[in-house]
């Protein structure tokens, strides 16, 4: 449980900083299709119970933090139900920030409530992108 709280606190602090810096950054974000595919694939892995596949979309540092695919999957199941078992998913904007790219994802959770999941990404040594965090907040739906 302590690691789950740490994850939420670290994600909230880091992604809060990303949000603040996003408006000041003029650089264009990489192709949002890449980020959307990664998120879709991870959500598919969650839905099928494939912890190893879901874990593979996380950065190396997150993998080290959570140690095993099973522990990672349990953390997401307990703390991130809207992205673990979404009823609907709609992609918003992707933005480049000083700390890296982010992708907005509007989800309706399993209990019918709307959420905004802000995913952050980090480029890996091999040139691929992986998820470095997810900040989840209640939402009224897609913003205009």
Image: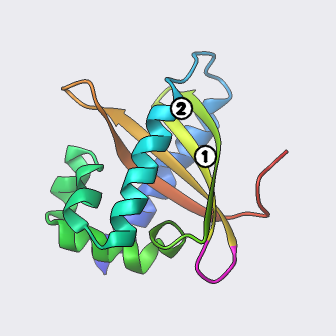
Query: Which element is circle 1 on?
Result: strand
Residue 138 on image: x %, y % = 68, 67
Which label sits on residue 29? none
Describe residue 121's horizontal placement relative to residue 18 as left or right. left
What residue is rendered at 49% in x and 75% in y? 81
**Quadrant placement of the C terminus:** top right
Query: Which element is circle 2 on?
Result: helix
Residue 107 on image: x %, y % = 62, 63
What residue is rendered at 31% in x and 81% in y? 1
24 lies above or below 33: above
For label 2, count other residues whose C-alpha is less than 10 Å away and answer few (under 14), some (14-19) or many (20+): some
Given residues 8 and 123, the one toward you in this image is 123
Marks 2 and 1 in Cβ contact (< 8 Å): no
What residue is rendered at 20% in x and 73% in y? 70
Q: What residue is shown with label 2?
A: 32
99 lies above or below 111: above
Given residues 2 and 53, the one toward you in this image is 53
Marks 2 and 1 sit apart, C-alpha to C-alpha, by 10 Å
Describe residue 38's horizontal placement relative to residue 114 as left or right. left
For label 1, count other residues whose C-alpha is less than 10 Å away and answer few (under 14), some (14-19) or many (20+): many
Describe residue 2's horizontal placement relative to residue 119 as left or right. left
Between circles 2 and 1, the one closer to the viewer is 2
44 lies above or below 97: below
**Residues drawn in magenta:** 109-113
Residue 61 on image: x %, y % = 22, 47
Tell whether position 9 is magenta. Answer: no
Which label sits on residue 104? 1
Given residues 7 and 89, the one toward you in this image is 89
Instruction: Tell me which secondary structure the magenta stretch mostly adopts.
Output: loop
Residue 91 on image: x %, y % = 62, 47
């Amino acid at each position: 449980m302590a690691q789950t709280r740490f994850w939420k606190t670290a994600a909230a602090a880091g992604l809060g900083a990303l949000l603040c810096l996003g408006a000041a950054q003029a650089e264009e974000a990489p192709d949002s299709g890449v980020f959307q595919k990664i998120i879709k694939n991870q959500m598919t892995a969650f839905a099928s119970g494939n912890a190893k596949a879901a874990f593979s979309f996380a950065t190396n540092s997150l993998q080290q933090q959570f140690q095993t695919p099973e522990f990672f999957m349990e953390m997401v199941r307990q703390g991130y139900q809207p992205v673990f078992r979404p009823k609907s998913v709609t992609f918003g904007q992707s933005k480049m920030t000083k700390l890296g790219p982010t992708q907005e994802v509007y989800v309706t959770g399993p209990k019918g409530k709307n959420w905004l999941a802000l995913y952050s990404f980090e480029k890996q040594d091999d040139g691929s992108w992986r998820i470095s965090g997810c900040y989840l907040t209640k939402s009224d739906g897609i913003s205009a």
